[in-house]
Amino acid sequence: TRALEDAGCHCLALCPGIAYCISNRLATGVVQHLGEDRRLVFGSAGTRGAAMQERLLAVQEVMQAADIRAELSDNVQQSLWRKYVVILSFAGITGLTRAPAGQIREDEHAMGLFRQLTHEAALVAAAEGFDLPDVREDVAGLLHRIAPDSK
């Protein structure tokens, strides 16, 4: 917070954001970070005035100076819905099957369920006004990129 204060961000409003980090818990207190897509996406929940835009840019600069991949989203609600679809699909299939990603990828029935979960989650997002045209391919790609033992 000191770096944010130094950047002139004394009274930041809370802003929604998404953390992207794939990890496995190996043991109590031991976390293994997987994949290269480690980043923070954030933005304003409402209409962004010039003052809020300046604050958000200052936050982004502080994060980037700390070697954090930070992205300011023009439509953070859309970004949140995209993340919801990913979580619902992946957590749904791993929870239902109690299997890691590698076993799911190799099982035709599990992959069918996974695609259906992704489709249903995307329909919910669309019903809420968030069209995510490529989310199904993105989620399927994630399942194929992550470590086989990921849950």
Image (tube, rainbow, N blue to C red):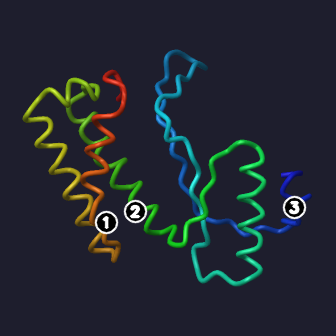
Q: How crowded is mark 2: few (under 14 residues within 10 Å), some or many (20 or more)?
A: many
Q: Which residue is drawn at 38% across and 55% down?
A: 84
Q: What amino acid does circle 1 point to? A: Leu
Answer left or right for 111 relative to 68: left
Q: Distance between the residues labelled 3 and 1?
A: 35 Å
SS label for mark 2? helix
Name the quarter where the C terminus is drawn. top left
Residue 67: percent from left, percent from top: 71, 42
Q: Distance between the residues labelled 3 and 2?
A: 30 Å
User: Label 2: which residue?
Assistant: 81
**Corner quadrant of residue 83:** bottom left
Does residue 84 sit above or below 143 in this rendering? below
Q: Residue at x 51, y 45 (%)?
A: 20
Residue found at the very far left of the displayed protein: 109
Q: Residue at x 50, y 36 (%)?
A: 36
Asked if marks 3 and 2 touch (Cβ < 8 Å), the reply is no
Residue 5: mark: none
Q: What amino acid does circle 2 point to? A: Trp
Dot placed on the residue nearer the N-terminal end, 2 or 1: 2
The residue mark sitting in front, 2 or 1, is 1
Q: Residues within 10 Å of mark 1 (few under 14, many from 20)?
A: some
Residue 7: mark: 3
**Corner quadrant of residue 58:** bottom right
Dot placed on the residue nearer the N-terminal end, 3 or 1: 3
User: Label 1: which residue?
Assistant: 132
